[in-house]
Amino acid sequence: MTQEPGTTPSPGAMRLQIIEQARRCVLGGGDLMGGPRVEPWIERSWRRCLALGHQPQHRIGFDAVSAVAMRHALDENRSLLAAASPVIRSLAHTMADTGYFAILTDAQGVVIEVNGPVDHQNRLAHAIARIGVDLSERAVGTTAIGTSLTEHQPVWLHRGEHFFDDTSAYSCAGAPLFGPDGRCVGMLDLTGIHVPERPALRHLVTRSALSIENALLLSHPHRLLLRLNWPGHGLGTDGDGLVGLGPDGHITGANRAAAHMLGLTTAPWPHGSDVFAMPIHQLFDAARHQLPPQEWPLWSGLRVQVLAGLNGVRRVEAPATAGARPNPLPLKDLETALIRQAVDDARGNVMQAARALGISRATVYRKLAIRPHKTG
């Protein structure tokens, strides 16, 4: 790229110059201490590519996996494809005037879905926008796909930040996708060819990834769904924590927001009673009676806002809107309300209510401050 003497380079040209200087430094065997900078995860990816024996001038085949492997990838990722389909269609509409398109891969970097304005007459577009092509870091070097799958974080790469010369025409944003068990199941990529840099796409792809992950969790088997947020924050957005519970109270799945709030790592998940400092049946009772969001204690000492719903049961009232604070009952009052409701449901039969709640009849009498009937 040439420039007239005495003129100030544009921000875009300066960005490409910095990238090129960083490439010469790292790929020439040096380090970036005190020199031009790129994101640390880009430098790590470049060094992984060098360790694999790659060189930037090597040609890339953009090879597809075998037909058998491709069918296996599509079959193994049917739930991911179903969860991602509406999100990718929405992305294609959002990016319609930018020249970017969406790519969905499995956890190994094999393309399983493409959507958007792909010009298959363009060799560079056709090379990557094909079901079954292997776009892993091992196969095509530093890209948003390989890097996000390796680093497990959203990324943005522009032109020469890709490792190979063959991929230096691309600009791409990527975000990993995590399943209900907390493990990475694939990634979502937004790519353009010879297009202006759009760093905002990293935010877009990150939010889109959350929508896909939440759809995956909702489709995962569960009896009770808990929607979580911190007290003072509204419920009802993709940023909520989501937790699925089985009929026995075991956690069947959690999205990343919930995992962070509850201190979960990866499956196998614990029983709900190991997380919530309360009898877990109270959450089921809250869902059965369609109680509004309430604050519940955790064993960590923190409290979270929880809206509980039974799978397949439509709530009468809508979740609290963003920014609205619920009117939480103290835990003692909520417990009393649940016991009173159980007694009402049992038509005053305290023994039957106690059995349904899993507590003693004496506890029911004590909590409701009523005297037991004397016999004889």
Image (spheres, rainbow, N blue to C red):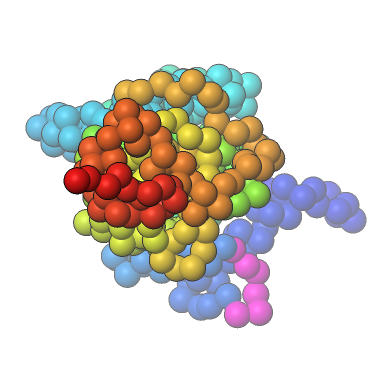
The image quarter containing residue 322 is top right
Tell which of 56 and 3 is nearer to you: 56
Q: Is residue 213 left or right of residue 202?
A: left
> How far from the left and from the top, in percent, is residue 344?
37, 31
- Whether 139 is drawn above or below 320: the answer is below
- Whether 67 is drawn above or below 361: the answer is above
Q: Is residue 274 left or right of residue 375?
A: right
Does the magenta run of residues contain 199?
no
Q: Is residue 359 left or right of residue 257?
A: left
The image quarter containing residue 48 is bottom left
> How far from the left and from the top, in percent, is residue 238?
52, 37
Which residues are drawn in magenta? 33-38
Numbered-mark total: 0
Tell which of 82 and 371 is nearer to you: 371
Q: Is residue 337 left or right of residue 237?
A: left
- Whether 115 is drawn above or below 360: the answer is above
Residue 108 visible, this orientation: no
Question: In the image, what residue occupies the spot 23% across and 38% down?
Answer: 352
Question: In the image, what residue occupies the spot 49% across and 54% down?
Answer: 332
> How far from the left and from the top, in percent, is residue 267?
25, 56
Question: In the image, what residue occupies the spot 29% across and 65% down?
Answer: 52
Tell which of 271 and 252 is nearer to you: 271
Residue 365 visible, this orientation: yes
Q: Going by the picture, which residue comes out furthest to the front?
A: 376
Q: Majority secondary structure of the magenta segment? A: loop
The image quarter containing residue 343 is top left
Question: In the image, what residue occupies the spot 55% across and 31% down?
Answer: 319
Tell which of 197 and 103 is nearer to you: 103
> How far from the left and from the top, in percent, is residue 367?
41, 52
Q: Going by the picture, which residue comes out furthest to the left?
A: 68
